[in-house]
Image (cartoon, rainbow, N blue to C red):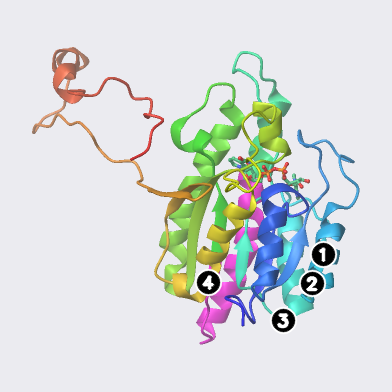
Amino acid sequence: MGLLDGKVAVVTGAGRGIGREEALLLAAEGARVVVNDVGAGLHGESGGDAHPAEEVVALIQTAGGEAAVNGDDISSWAGGKNVVEQAIDTFGSLDILVNNAGILRDKMSFNMDESDWDDVIRVHLKGHFAATHHAAVYWRNRAKSGEDVTGRIINTSSEAGLFGNAGQANYAAAKAGIAALTWVEARELGRYGVTSNAIAPRARTRMTETIFGGDGMSAAEGAFDAWDPKNIANVVAFLAAPASADITGQILVVFGADIYAMSAFKAVGQVTRDKAWTPEELVAAKGDLFKGISSGVPDFSFI
Ligand SMILES: NC(=O)c1ccc[n+]([C@@H]2O[C@H](COP(=O)([O-])OP(=O)(O)OC[C@H]3O[C@@H](n4cnc5c(N)ncnc54)[C@H](O)[C@@H]3O)[C@@H](O)[C@H]2O)c1
């Protein structure tokens, strides 16, 4: 008996890294999985990796599970439609959509060119929305025809998007957009039986190995491996489970065994009165508005 017996899942960018472990675990928990991956290089270049999704599907099948390869570019509207339709055509339904695919083009704002901006925003932000749109159409139609829907959307944000990170204007903007998308989806789709949550993971993959050079990302022999992407997959399977029907609009930072439920934006200062403020009056009132607040940049710390 698995936690996800009878469920059908799509995991995007599941040929490598975190998505690979998510696909493997969802399948081990009983889900039939469409393993999407376009085989992109870290920076989004084509031909980076020939058939990573096929390897993941083979692993799932060898372990006795069911899976299918999807090689669509998830950042296209047609790709999002295809992957949703493939799940329904191949396995009869879609219950879980894990939006995970991503690329990196880190540069300071003054060095970034237009294609760095466009490609990262497209792969992450549109890549999260394209499949979600088509899944939402499917779930809403089912709910409206009286069916019991237990849809799950699990998005992949990043601490870069929640806190801001120098050198990642494109990536952080996309990841903050994904957090906002998660709240919108939670508001829109709850009435149709669909939850939407996001993770902001930290794990050892080619993405982080590039940034940190692999330093400090391995565990001593026999010790708990906090950087193992399998840790992230556990949280995704939890959010995908039927028992998580009451969790929606949440953003979880996940690193090893540390899981933080993050709050959304909150007002931390205020000035108010019954007529408009002139700019000059705001200069005089700024001490009250920002009382006790040293910077608008979020504090990169947890509880
Ligand atoms: N590794 C971390 O610590 C970390 C931290 C924060 C956020 N994330 C996020 O987690 C997700 C997974 O990252 P990862 O570290 O496993 O990276 P990764 O590079 O190992 O895997 C990303 C996968 O996405 C695929 N992909 C890229 N563009 C695609 C497209 N258009 N269509 C389909 N597939 C595509 C790639 O081929 C690759 O297999 C990303 O969204 C990333 O931003 C990772």
The residue located at (42%, 62%) in the rendering is 248
The residue located at (66%, 19%) in the rendering is 112
- Where residue 20 appears, as percent x and y from the top left, is 72, 55
Q: Which residue is mark 2?
A: 63
Mark 2 against mark 3, which lies toward the viewer?
2
Is residue 297 placed above or below 140 in the rendered structure? above
Q: Residues within 10 Å of mark 1 (few under 14, many from 20)?
A: some
Mark 2 and mark 3 in contact? Answer it, CB < 8 Å. Answer: no
Task: Tell me the CA gap for discs 1 and 2.
Answer: 6 Å
Mark 1 and mark 2 in contact? Answer it, CB < 8 Å. Answer: yes
What is the secondary structure assignment of the residue under circle 3?
loop
Image quadrant in which the C terminus is located? top left
Q: Which residue is mark 1?
A: 59
Residue 143 within the magenta-colored segment of the rendering = yes
Q: Which residue is mark 4?
A: 241
Ligand 1 contact, mark 1 (Cβ < 8 Å): no
Q: Earlier in the sequence, mark 2 or mark 3?
A: 2
Q: Which residue is mark 3?
A: 92
Ligand 1 contact, mark 3 (Cβ < 8 Å): no
Q: Residues within 10 Å of mark 3 (few under 14, many from 20)?
A: few
Task: Tell me the CA gap for discs 4 and 3.
Answer: 18 Å
Residue type pointed to by label 2 = Ala
Q: Nearer the viewer, residue 227 or 253?
A: 227
